[in-house]
């Protein structure tokens, strides 16, 4: 299952590169015109390590290696290639402390709920891997002060739970750039047609894996209050400017209609 954007990278800003791996985005933070140092946000789908390395070398040069990996969360489509990458990269991995049980082999995520939407991706979600992984040798908790190790000054991580307990987003206040992960996305992730065509529309976190909808709403409110000017999300095309402002405001005001499913095993 791949979108029309799979294998395509976009320089959202000189130092923000969004690359689509099948149906999920990963992000490189670092300006190749100014530095050889960069950080990788999330690691895409399983069996994509070679493709990810090729993309990185194309952007940063032969044998380029990130200083660190930062995970927005640990769902299979965001950590799919991390174990393979870490076989060659002896670098630290950072995640929220509440996500660590799923990244150290101690816990599994709740299974996908196919009843949250009529879309085919939602219906397929029971087949999606929900098991935790064990990268305990290299993963460590993000600092409690909100700073992000190995990233340029100005970046802060923000706890945005709901989709998962330890989900985070990243924000740079100086230009109001947001890496949202799956706190909200810019495609209706439950619909196979819209995922494949990458139809741009603001949406809440992917419904089939979101387990705490009250907290998910609070996280969207928190991110909207930052008034981001650019947003790269875990799924969908990056959004910016007035379109982002209007759509994010609409999502907050109509969250129960736009984002929260009417029923499902994780819906109160």
Image: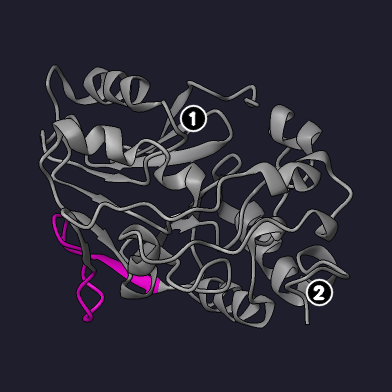
State which tag comes first along the sequence, 1 or 2: 1
The percent coordinates of residue 125 (x first, y second) are: 70, 47
Per the image, is 216 magenta?
no
As measured in the structure, the alpha-carbon distance from the residue carrying label 1 to the one carrying label 2 is 30 Å
Q: Who is closer to the viewer here, 175 or 30?
A: 30
Query: What number is the disc on residue 80?
Result: none
Q: Tell me the SS state at disc 1.
A: strand
Q: Residues within 10 Å of mark 2 (few under 14, many from 20)?
A: some
Q: Is residue 126 left or right of residue 80?
A: right
Residue picked out by circle 2 = 256
The residue depicted at 40 percent of the width and 62 percent of the height is: 102
Residue stretch in magenta: 142-158
Q: Who is closer to the viewer here, 88 or 167?
A: 88
Q: Is residue 42 above or below residue 72?
A: above
Report the residue that reaches farthest toward the front.
Answer: 106
Q: Who is closer to the viewer here, 217 or 225?
A: 217
Q: Are marks 1 and 2 in contact (CB under 8 Å)?
A: no
Q: Tell me the SS state at disc 2.
A: helix
Q: Is residue 130 above or below residue 214?
A: above
Q: Is residue 77 left or right of residue 154?
A: right
The residue depicted at 51 percent of the width and 74 percent of the height is: 161
The residue depicted at 42 percent of the width and 71 percent of the height is: 166
The percent coordinates of residue 91 (x first, y second) are: 12, 45
The percent coordinates of residue 16 (x first, y second) are: 34, 42
Query: What number is the disc on residue 21?
Result: 1
Q: Main secondary structure of the magenta part?
A: loop
The residue depicted at 40 percent of the width and 26 percent of the height is: 48
Q: Answer yes or no: is residue 55 visible.
A: yes
Q: Is residue 84 above or below residue 74?
A: above
Q: Is residue 217 above or below residue 191?
A: below
């Amino acid at each position: 299952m791949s979108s029309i954007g799979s294998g395509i990278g976009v320089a959202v800003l000189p130092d923000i590169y969004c690359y689509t791996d099948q149906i999920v985005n990963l992000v490189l933070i670092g300006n190749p015109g100014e530095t050889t140092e960069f950080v990788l946000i999330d690691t895409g789908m399983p069996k994509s390590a070679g493709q990810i390395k090729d993309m990185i070398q194309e952007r940063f040069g032969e044998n380029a290696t990130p200083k660190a990996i930062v995970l927005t969360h640990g769902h299979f489509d965001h950590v799919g290639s991390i174990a393979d990458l870490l076989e060659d990269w002896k670098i630290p991995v950072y995640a929220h402390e509440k996500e660590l049980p799923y990244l150290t082999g101690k816990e599994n995520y709740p299974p996908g709920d196919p009843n949250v939407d009529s879309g085919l991706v939602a219906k397929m979600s029971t087949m999606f891997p929900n098991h935790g992984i064990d990268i305990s040798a290299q993963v460590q908790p993000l600092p409690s002060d909100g700073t992000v190790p190995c990233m340029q000054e100005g970046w802060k991580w923000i706890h945005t739970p709901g989709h998962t307990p330890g989900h985070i987003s990243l924000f740079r206040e100086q230009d109001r750039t947001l890496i949202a992960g799956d706190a909200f996305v810019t495609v209706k992730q439950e619909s196979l047609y819209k995922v494949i065509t990458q139809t741009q529309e603001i949406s809440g976190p992917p419904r089939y894996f979101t387990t705490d909808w009250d907290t998910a709403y609070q996280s969207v409110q928190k991110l909207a209050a930052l008034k981001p000017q650019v947003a790269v999300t875990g799924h969908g095309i990056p959004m910016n400017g007035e379109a982002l402002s209007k759509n994010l405001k609409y999502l907050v005001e109509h969250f129960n209609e736009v984002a929260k499913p009417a029923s499902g095993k994780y819906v109160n």
